[in-house]
Image: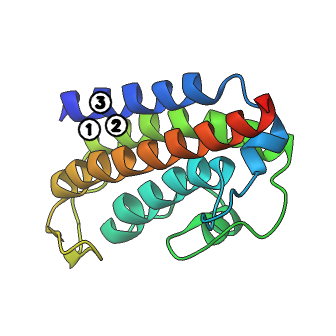
Amino acid sequence: MKEQFEMLRKTRKSLLDLIGDLTIEQLNEVPAGFNNNIAWNLSHLVAAQQGVCYLRSNNKMIIDESYFSSYKPGSKPEGIISADEIEKTRDLLLGTIDQFEADYNNQLLSNYTPWTTRYGTELRTIEDATTFLLYHEGLHLGYIMALKRLVAIKENV
């Protein structure tokens, strides 16, 4: 599992590097044809990880319920995400992985409730969930890359 945690960290660090030069306006822009923005996608990664790993293993999330509700699967941006909220998300992207690894190593996530994702993947254990997270994070990395191209092009025109 050490490799999976390291891959999650690398993916999230890459995301932070990718969006490092974007303005608050660009992070919040919802381009035509999309139903969300870069800021929502980043926050969604945190919320999804908490739901998939903590709630499904019958643990309390390490994020606020209101944060989770705003960015859980099925949600969408409901307004401008502030600079403070984006900064909070930047911290959570790495901090939640560090805590996840510590909680995993302390066997706090072993009481996992099996379920099937909307992609048809059956998750039976926290290890399955972690593997699924890598897939999910890659999906959203692709979305964020596409969104960045659109908001950056618009800025350069």
Tag 3 near tag 2, CB within 8 Å? no
Residues packed near mark 3 inside 10 Å, few (<14), some (14 to 19) or many (20 plus): few
**Numbered label tally:** 3
Q: Residue 51: horizontal and vertical position, in percent?
A: 44, 65
Q: What residue would you read off at disc 2?
A: 101
Which residue type carries mark 3?
Met
Residues packed near mark 1 inside 10 Å, few (<14), some (14 to 19) or many (20 plus): few
Report the Cα–Cα distance between label 3 and label 2. Answer: 12 Å
Report the Cα–Cα distance between label 3 and label 1. Answer: 16 Å
Quadrant in the rendering for residue 80: bottom right
Q: Nearer the viewer, residue 23 or 51?
A: 23
State left or right for residue 30 relative to residue 55. right
Q: What residue would you read off at disc 1?
A: 105
Q: Nearer the viewer, residue 14 or 96?
A: 14
Report the Cα–Cα distance between label 1 and label 2. Answer: 6 Å
Q: Nearer the viewer, residue 102 or 40?
A: 40
Q: Residue 18: horizontal and vertical position, in percent?
A: 56, 26
Quadrant in the rendering for residue 115: bottom left
Which label's residue is closer to the chain start, 3 or 1? Answer: 3
Determine whether the residue tagged by mark 3 lies in a helix, strand or loop. helix
Q: Quadrant of the N terminus?
A: top left
State left or right for residue 128 relative to residue 38. left
| Disc nearest the viewer among 3 and 1 | 3
| Disc nearest the viewer among 1 and 2 | 2
Q: What residue would you read off at disc 3?
A: 7
